[in-house]
Image (cartoon, helix red, strand yellow):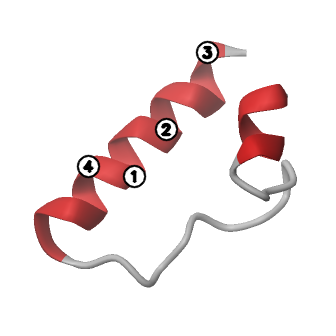
Amino acid sequence: MVRRAAYGMSETDPLPLFLEGEEGELWHFIMKAFLTAD
């Protein structure tokens, strides 16, 4: 929960779509890990 707040996201916010390429894939991988770690 704290990690989501740190990124300015609520539980219902979609993942950011402004990243592209490897950077975007890495971000999505990290966020997916955070979301499933709760």
Q: With respect to residue 7, does 33 lie above or below?
A: above
First-in-chain label (3 vs 4): 4
C-beta proximity under 8 Å, tags 4 and 1:
yes
Marks 1 and 3, how far apart at CA: 14 Å
Residue sitting at the far top = 37
The type of residue carrying mark 3 is Ala
- To which residue does mark 1 refer? 28
The type of residue carrying mark 2 is Lys
Label 3 sits on a secondary structure element that is helix
Measured as percent of width and height from the top left, residue 10 is found at 87, 54
- To which residue does mark 3 refer? 37
Measured as percent of width and height from the top left, residue 33 is found at 47, 27
- To which residue does mark 2 refer? 32
C-beta proximity under 8 Å, tags 2 and 1:
yes
Label 1 sits on a secondary structure element that is helix
C-beta proximity under 8 Å, tags 4 and 2:
no
Measured as percent of width and height from the top left, residue 27 is found at 37, 52
The type of residue carrying mark 1 is His
Relative horizontal placement of residue 2, taking residue 36 as reference (left or right): right
Pointer 2: residues within 10 angstroms few (<14), some, or many (20+)?
A: few
Label 4 sits on a secondary structure element that is helix
Relative horizontal placement of residue 6, taking residue 36 as reference (left or right): right
Q: Which residue occupies the foreground of this view, 31 or 6?
A: 6
Count of residue discs? 4
The type of residue carrying mark 4 is Leu
Q: Which residue occupies the foreground of this view, 2 or 31?
A: 2
Query: Which image quarter is the C terminus in?
Result: top right
Measured as percent of width and height from the top left, residue 8 is found at 78, 58
